Image: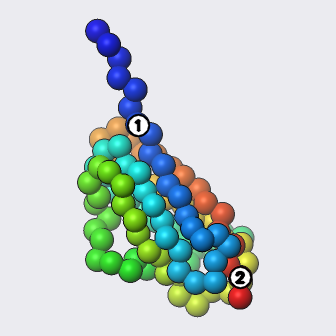
Amino acid sequence: RLSRTSQEFRSEVYPNPTTGPISLRLHLPEAGRVELNLVDVAGKPLPVWLLSDTSSNLASGVHDLTLFFGRIVPGCYSLFVHVVSSNGMQKMNHKIIVIQ
């Protein structure tokens, strides 16, 4: 019996640093529910909006999302990306730097 290596979940953000919206590219090896959380350095949650009407349930494959943060001050933020699928939860964390 041959074992198969499963693809792993990956995510990328760009541009970073940014002056406005960022792009989030998700590589999902299987369908899952995507949760996005943005926090400042004090741990305070901030709103995140998607450009499109993309559902939080995404099919397997590559997805490009545009994220807006509203009016936040320049600084360093953490974007937490969680994907919940039949194999459990996978997590990624990105440091995002907002400049003027």
Which quadrant, please, contains the N terminus?
A: top left
Q: Pick the quarter of the image with the C terminus.
A: bottom right
* Amino acid type at mark 2: Ile
Question: Looking at the image, what colour scheme do you see?
Answer: rainbow
Q: Position of residue 49 (x, y in %)?
A: 43, 79
- Circle nearer the N terminus (2, 1): 1
**Which residue is label 2 attached to?**
99
The amino acid at mark 1 is Gln
Left or right: 56, with 11 as reference point: left
Residue 67 drawn at (x, y percent): 47, 76
At a point 35% along the width and 23% down the height, the residue shown is: 4
Q: Which residue is mark 1?
A: 7
- The tag on residue 81 is none
Can you give x and y, in whole percent of width and height, for residue 29 in the image? 35, 43
Q: Is residue 50 above or below residue 64?
A: below
Give the SS element for disc 1.
loop
Which image quadrant for residue 73? bottom right
